[in-house]
Image (cartoon, rainbow, N blue to C red):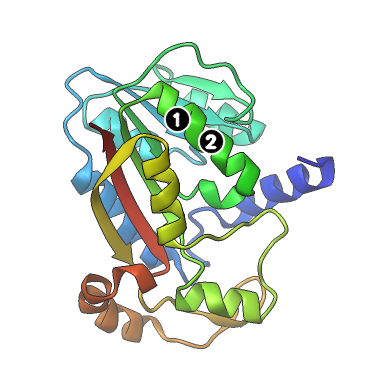
Amino acid sequence: MAGFVESDIKRYYEEWWENPRDPRDHVFKRLNRLILKKLPPGDGRKALDIGSGKGTIVGFLLQKGYQAAAVEFNENFVRDLRQRFPAVDVIEGDFNAVLIDRTFDLVTAVEFIQNLDRDSLRLFFRKVAALTGHLILTVSNKKSLHGFWAVFRGFIKPFVHVYTPREIETLVRASGFEITSRRGIGLLTPITLFSDFRWKLIPDWLTKLVNPWGDRLFPRSCHLYYLEARKS
């Protein structure tokens, strides 16, 4: 990853990750509630969270009773994670580049793979397949309203690579997993006319009215796509 892109991605997520000013914030919160609900009890088993950011999923894993480890390449997030979760082994670096010499009962990668190009994504799945037999991940959907609009308006950052649910499902299966659960979140996501989430075009009340039924009927058209997979 080029140096200027690395600094851009760190700066972007420090500003916008779990930021209430992001009009998509309530969609991400719905995703988090789904993940917390879907996580099985840990009972002391080992879990790895990839791309931990500010630590929401790490907190969920601990709450569920897992021995948690985390991989994060933003040094500021790493420092904060180590302060907040002293019992968690926080590995600093690019997941595809760091050495991980153990296996896990569960690996989570939430809002992470959109930062991987196709070659890096294939490497990601090869590496994950060697680490676990149980995977939970999410996809930022290229074929959602949000995906179409971001491309049309030129909002896609150079470090963002969007994929369709079918593309990711194909890679998941090719890595030796069977998909056991899938859900869509955010059929109607608040889009904005300008970059940096300025001038909202779709009001929150409309998204909150539409999404509870729309997500169930049209999961492959939602902004966020949840997948759970296990090795047979």
Closer to us: 60 or 171:
171
Dot 2, crowdedness within 10 Å: few (<14), some or many (≥20)?
some
Q: Is residue 52 left or right of residue 204?
A: right
Residue placed at 36% from the left, 34% from the top? 176
Kindly state the secondary structure of the residue where label 1 is placed: helix
Residue placed at 43% from the left, 12% from the top? 102
Q: Is residue 105 left or right of residue 7?
A: left
Residue 160: which disc?
A: none
Closer to us: 50 or 82:
50
Residue placed at 29% from the left, 23% from the top? 105
Residue wearing tag 2: 124
Expressed as whole percent of the image width and height from the top left, the position of residue 46 reads 31, 19
Disc 1 vs disc 2: Cβ atoms closer than 8 Å?
Answer: yes
Dot 1, crowdedness within 10 Å: few (<14), some or many (≥20)?
many
Kindly state the secondary structure of the residue where label 2 is placed: helix
Expressed as whole percent of the image width and height from the top left, the position of residue 68 reads 36, 23
Expressed as whole percent of the image width and height from the top left, the position of residue 179 reads 27, 46
How far apart marks 1 and 2 lie (CA) works out to 6 Å
Residue placed at 45% from the left, 30% from the top? 128
Q: Amino acid at mark 2?
A: Phe
Residue most toward the top?
101
Q: Quadrant of the N terminus?
A: top right
Q: Is residue 10 left or right of residue 53?
A: right
Residue wearing tag 1: 128
Q: Amino acid at mark 1?
A: Val
Q: Quadrant of the C terminus?
A: top left
Residue most toward the front?
174
